[in-house]
Image (cartoon, rainbow, N blue to C red):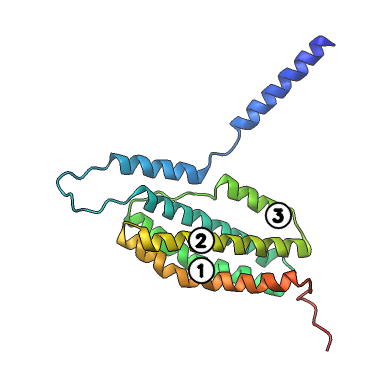
Amino acid sequence: MKNFAKLYSGLIVISFLLSCNSRTPDSVKSAKEVNARRIDSESRPDDSSAIVLTKDDADFLVNTASGVMLESEMGQLARDRSGNQRVKELGAMIVKDHKEAQAKLKKLAAAKNVTLPAEISNHQQKQKEGLLKKEGIEFDRSYVDLTVNDYNKDIRDFGKAAKYATDPDVKSFASNSLPLLYTHLDSARNLQKVMKSRIDITTPIPK
């Protein structure tokens, strides 16, 4: 019995170690580390007036890339899985608009030699997996709530970058993106209010 207990304990430890080693590296964290090393290695002693992209500016672009991917992927889920027409339309609008935003972001990142993440962060992946577990009205409400929360955070981050970013192109990108972010937030908030009224908006209200 003692030998069995030791064997069982050993298997638990091995299983735990294997699960830790099998975890996917965080793409967002990796991108930030790559950019930080490059920025630290850059030096321009002969041109002190040159603007060097700061870590904060690079991190903003990385965070924006992961946010755009997450909101696009969740938008696709809403468009494909929801039975609510207004939820589907919100998801489709976000997917469409984010394609254009992503193209601008990639162009800017390439010009600034900033490495962007290939995937969403591990935390964002958990958010997406949580949404995937829901169905029906619970899915719709969770999607809309997540969208409102994400855009509230986006607007804070973009507002900060629009005001404090060191690089003028990054600052301009952030400032020019804010109107669309507000449009998406307003659409999601309006839908959230309807959801919280507990009226099924797919069913016509009797006259």
Q: Amino acid at mark 3?
A: Leu
Q: Which residue is denoted by mark 1 in the rendering?
A: 181
Q: Nearer the viewer, residue 132 or 54?
A: 54
* Residue 84 can be seen in this image: no
At numbered mark 1, what does the secondary structure look like: helix, strand or loop?
helix
Residue found at x 55% / y 63%: 152
The Cα–Cα distance between marks 1 and 3, rounded to whole angstroms, is: 24 Å
| Among the 4 quarters of the image, the one containing residue 15 | top right
Graded by Cα atoms within 10 Å as few (under 14), some (14 to 19) or many (20 or more), the crowding at tag 3 reads some
Give the number of marks: 3
Question: Foreground mark, 2 or 3?
Answer: 2
The image shows residue 69, relative to residue 202, as above or below, that is: above
Residues at discs 2 and 1 in contact (Cβ within 8 Å): yes
Residue 21 position, x and y percent, is 59, 30
The image shows residue 45, relative to residue 203, as above or below, that is: above
Quarter holding the N terminus is top right
| Among the 4 quarters of the image, the one containing residue 143 | bottom right
Q: Which residue is denoted by mark 2 in the rendering?
A: 154
Residues at discs 1 and 3 in contact (Cβ within 8 Å): no
Counting residues from the N terminus, which is met first, the one under dot 1 or under dot 3? 3
